Image: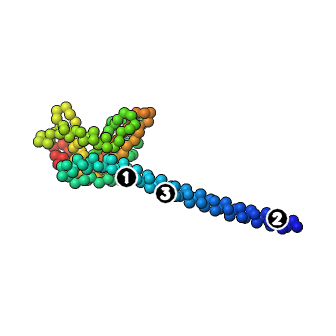
Amino acid sequence: MVVPKLQQTAGRGRGRGRGHGAIVIVILVVLFMCRAADSKQSAYLNQVIISQFLTPHNAARSALQLHPLVWDPHVAHYAEWYARRRRWDCALEHSNGPYGENIFWGSGDDWTPAQAVADWLSERRWYDRRRNSCAWDRECGHYTQIVWNSTRRVGCARVLCFGGRGVFITCNYDPPGNYIGERPY
């Protein structure tokens, strides 16, 4: 009589194990589906951010009948690497890397990529094409880098600086522009 009782207990144990196994499988499937949904949402958000950088760049270039820039993930990786280095101090210091570069800093935490690019493009009013120079005591190099004719690729990044120091945004351009004595377009 003892043996059947043991077999019955063992039988219930196996049944419970199969039930738990099914629950584990269901949980894993749900987690996988959530991760896939998060991945799709993340990809969508990345495309939105890329568009916020790229659209104003290419609108300015289109107005001058220049070819559009394309987003380059390698250049963007470099921009991200450098932006992360700047998040400690938010200093407006150039990376002195292999690319052309525009940098932006804004206080607070709500500056968008489009606002940074608009700030750079606002320097257009200071560029004197006839003289190929900026107006006296003004900057226009951010603008000329954006519309540099031979530049083909861009990659950008935005980070919040630590300690509430603001937002640091950088765009890198390949090949670089702003060569002294050369016209941007």
- At x 16%, y 35%, the residue is 135
Q: Amino acid at mark 2?
A: Leu
What element does badge 2 sit on? helix
Q: Nearer the viewer, residue 41 or 128?
A: 41
Q: CA distance from mark 2 to mark 1?
A: 61 Å
Q: Residue furthest right?
A: 1
Is 29 displayed left or right of 59 in the figure?
A: right
Q: CA distance from mark 1 to mark 3?
A: 17 Å
Q: Quadrant of the N terminus?
A: bottom right
Residue 75 percent location from the top left of the image: 33, 50
Q: Nearer the viewer, residue 94 or 16?
A: 16
Is 84 displayed left or right of 3 in the figure?
A: left
* Residue matched to label 2: 6
What element does badge 1 sit on? helix
- At x 24%, y 45%, the residue is 145
* Residue matched to label 3: 36
Q: Amino acid at mark 1?
A: Gln
Q: CA distance from mark 2 to mark 3?
A: 45 Å
Q: Amino acid at mark 3?
A: Ala
Mark closest to the chain's N terminus, 2 or 3: 2
* Residue matched to label 1: 47
Quadrant in the picture for residue 103: top left
Quadrant in the picture for residue 5: bottom right
